[in-house]
Amino acid sequence: MIRIIVTLALSFMLASCMKWDGKKKYFSQAGTSTAESLANEVPTTLRRITKSQYLNTVRAALGADITSRTPLPDDPTKDELIAIATRDSVFSLRDAELYSNAGWDMAGQFVDSPTLFSTRFECACGDMTKACLSKGLDGIGPVLFHGQFEDSAFYGQLFDDVLAKLTKDVGGLTPQQMNCQGVRTVLAALIGSPRSFYYDNLLAFSGNLATDIQKQKFSTSLANQLSYFLWNSPPDRELMNLAESGALADPEARIKLIRSMVDNPNRFKAGMKALFDDWLAMHAVEKVASSTNAQETIAKAALVEFDFLVSKSVESTDFLGTFLTSNATVLDANLAAVYGVAANATTLSGTDRAGFLTRSAFLLRAGTGATSPTKRGHYIRGHFLCEDIPPPPPGLDLTNGVPNTDDKYQIIKARLDNPNCKGCHAQLDPLGIGLEGYGPNGQTIAFPNIATYQLAASVFDQPYSGGAELSNLLVKNEKVLACFAKNALRIGLGKKETPEEQEAIEKAVEAFQAGTSKSLNELIFHLLNGIM
């Protein structure tokens, strides 16, 4: 029976995909001529939401705190989060299968719970009628489909077809059981549709919005863009009502909205937690935490500590200083053993545990083997300074003068002396080598005598000793704040900045630095105010 239902649901999902032109660059308005549609164009791209955003969308749509018990596709990387916002956005058949499985699972949880089901439908699933289904979907569909749900009749037909198929091919089911299976199939098709995990992403925040249709399209896209960025969830009813009115086409209304959104503490914290996860590639630590290797338990505790540090930073009047220099912590016995402190400790030694770069969530990334100054330096330079060092070109001789030894410091020295390697390694190794006082899990270990290898730690051409000193030098340098600002907007808005927007970003960072508050919500407000 399940195979029959799922097959039917998948066929309708494919039909739904065909109805929704997933590679379309512009919105189109049903019932308008080609000329009218062209006149109402609003340039957009498609953007795939992350796993947490997808689950938050399903929860908001169903009014239920449920999660998928089946795996979802991996989130895009930091760079893919930007690149995915293109007119040619696609997803694999494997991704489609995973979303379909998740839809079937979450729809089942919802239908099987009379308490949950009654929050969206006025009738029980066994007593479902087309009218009751349509009324319930009118509240669910617009949330799942990001404000663009005009398919109630389409899904009503799916409900009828499931009942007909069950009546013909499956025996022994009561009418009530068939109704519940029909509702589950409809909800699974909605939740697993590409329209639920893609939304239209604006390419520009200014332009000639002459018609009411343009204003409404622009406002709906912007509402989704801002809500997923700032709150990590879909727009609430109040925000969507504002969008449907076309009010966000007015710059003053946009700025007023942004101010209210960044000043909503709980929702803003959820959005910024997701931003920090994407910015710092925390999916790598999450994979370790879900593995069975020796770092699993430490990685789980490190993620909890990272969440705590981000929360402290978002609440702080100096968010970047807190994130990079705070010695506050939350521990379990495993992480406490790594740091050499009691499990009930709430602070760590400020001499060697200052902020993110001195915690296991960063330090364990190289694995259980030897530490890697090169990898640590590469991570810091890319994520905190926006200076991505590419891999060496093919065919370049990287072996000249590099000894065949297990002594990594001899190898680092040889690479710094090799003219084919020095250009990149001079930017990476001195930056990371000062963190060699932390072991593979982040534990404190004896710092090696790197001077005997003629090596030294430095950042911004300044020598440093240990993670706390490095963190203090980073937080004082304007490059770090500027890099965070660039990453925040690229990840949050799903697009690279135009030259005009880059100039606006620089001015916004200057205005933020000149202000009295160094809180994260003030920075984000300055940035969005500057480009909108």
Image (cartoon, rainbow, N blue to C red):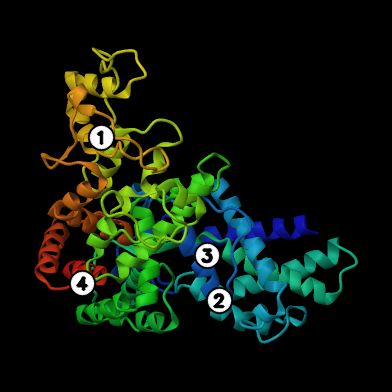
Amino acid type of disc 4?
A: Asn
Q: Which label belongs to residue 208?
A: 4
First reached walking from the N terminus: tag 3 or tag 4: 3
Cβ atoms at labels 1 and 2 below 8 Å apart: no
Camera-nearest residue between 29 and 401:
401
Q: CA–CA distance between discs 1 and 4?
A: 53 Å
- Viewed as shown, does residue 13 lie left or right of 219? right
| N-term mark: 3 or 2 | 3
Residue 55 - label: 3
SS label for mark 2: helix
* Marked residue nearer the N-terminal end (1 or 2): 2
Instruction: Categorize mark 2 by other alpha carbons within 10 Å: few (<14), some (14-19), many (20+).
Output: many
Quadrant (top left/top right/bottom left/bottom right) for the C terminus? bottom left
Kindly identify which numbered label has been placed on residue 140: 2
**Secondary structure of residue under mark 4:** loop
Residue 279 image point, x, y percent: 33, 53
| Disc number placed over residue 100 in the picture, else none | none
User: Which circle, 2 or 4, is nearer the viewer?
Assistant: 2
Figure check: 422 above or below 128: above
Q: Which amino acid type is marked by label 3?
A: Leu
